[in-house]
């Protein structure tokens, strides 16, 4: 896998934007054309760090991120996404996936230090009890439901820092696994092209609260 480090990327200006959560939600729309400039790498790291703060059941943190900035890898990723041009247009594409097997192998890492040694041991027992009898695909599905939370956090974190994104599930997952050297068991929350908008996108079009809500 080709990896582009900070030192090989031109620097671009650090974002001074800090939208509130409400403003990030209201101004987030899918953007498929981006300004052609490299992404500031400190902003990228901050956005990933914010997304990593998402909650998950038992604090499992099943999500993993693969950051694609190399033009060669992006070209191949675009091909795996049926040629969708937003991948090539964005300076950065974050692949968000869930690795439930890694989560289970390293479960002590996610047990809160406040739980103590006994608590950590119990954390492993809890996970073994919950997932030991399930097959890899079944527990992978559970892992994905946790990673989807981080995917949502990632979009809003990006918007809060003045960036735009488009969530994507239109790609061949096996082709992406092969391209990035990821194991067969990983499940994808989605691809997230990210950059500064070079188009307005469509205004949000959503159900009303009344249409989707029952009050009891
Ligand atoms: C899980 C998911 C997968 C999506 N996949 C694609 C995709 O492959 N290609 C694309 O152009 N847009 C994709 N979208 C964007 C949706 O079309 C878009 O979010 C929706 O129409 C609402 O528009 P908005 O994001 O501008 O508010 C996806 C969105 C989500 C949440």
Image: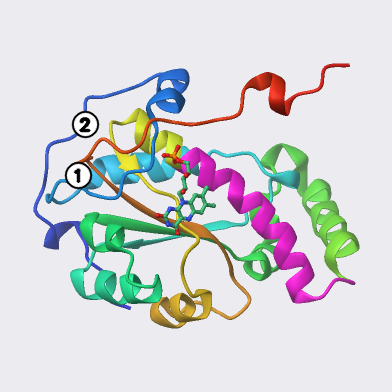
Task: Pinpoint residue 185: horizontal percent, then vertical percent.
Answer: 63, 76
Question: Which segment did they paint magenta?
Answer: 133-154
Give yes or no for contact between labels 1 and 2 (Cβ–Cβ under 8 Å): yes
Instruction: Classify the position of the C terminus by image quarter.
Output: top right
- Asked if residue 9 lies left or right of residue 208, the reply is left
Q: Residue at x 38, y 73 (%)?
A: 82
The quarter of the picture where residue 202 lies is top left
Task: Pinpoint residue 203: horizontal percent, then vertical percent.
Answer: 38, 30
Task: Pinpoint residue 19: horizontal percent, then vertical percent.
Answer: 35, 21
Q: Residue at x 31, y 38 (%)?
A: 201
Q: Nearer the viewer, residue 212 or 69?
A: 212
Relative to 87, say whether 133 is above or below: below
Relative to 146, say whether 175 is above or below: below
Q: Which residue is mark 2?
A: 15
As helix, strand or loop, the secondary structure at mark 2 comes to loop
Q: Which residue is mark 1?
A: 40
The quarter of the picture where residue 66 lies is bottom left
Q: Is residue 7 magenta?
A: no
Q: Nearer the viewer, residue 170 or 44?
A: 170
Q: In whole angstroms, how far apart are the C-alphas of marks 1 and 2?
A: 8 Å
- Which secondary structure is most common in the magenta stretch? helix
Instruction: Classify the position of the N terminus by image quarter.
Output: bottom left
Name the N-terminal-most of marks 1 and 2.
Answer: 2
- Asked if residue 142 lies left or right of residue 42, the reply is right
Relative to 216, say whether 61 is above or below: below
Task: Categorize mark 1 by other alpha carbons within 10 Å: few (<14), some (14-19), many (20+).
Answer: some
Q: Residue at x 74, y 58 (%)?
A: 142
Q: Is residue 135 magenta?
A: yes
Relative to 96, say whether 77 is above or below: below
Q: Residue at x 49, y 75 (%)?
A: 172
């Amino acid at each position: 896998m080709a990896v582009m480090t900070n030192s090989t990327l031109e620097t671009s200006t650090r974002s001074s934007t800090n939208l509130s959560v409400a403003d990030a939600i209201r101004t987030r729309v899918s953007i498929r054309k981006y300004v052609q400039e490299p992404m500031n790498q400190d902003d990228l790291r901050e956005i990933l760090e914010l997304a990593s703060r998402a909650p998950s059941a038992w604090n499992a943190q099943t999500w993993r991120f693969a950051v694609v900035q190399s033009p060669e890898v992006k070209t191949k990723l675009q091909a795996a996404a049926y040629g969708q041009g937003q991948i090539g247009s964005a300076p950065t594409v974050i692949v968000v996936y869930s690795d439930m097997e890694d989560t289970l192998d390293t479960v002590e890492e996610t047990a809160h230090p406040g739980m103590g040694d006994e608590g950590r041991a119990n954390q492993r027992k809890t996970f073994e009890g919950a997932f030991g009898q399930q097959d890899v695909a079944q527990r992978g599905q559970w892992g994905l439901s946790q990673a989807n939370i981080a995917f949502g956090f990632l979009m809003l974190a990006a918007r809060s820092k003045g960036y735009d994104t488009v969530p994507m599930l239109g790609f061949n997952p096996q082709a992406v696994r092969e391209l990035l050297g990821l194991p067969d068991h990983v499940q994808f929350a989605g691809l997230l092209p990210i950059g500064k908008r070079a188009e307005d996108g469509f205004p949000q079009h959503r159900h009303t609260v009344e249409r989707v809500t029952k009050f009891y």
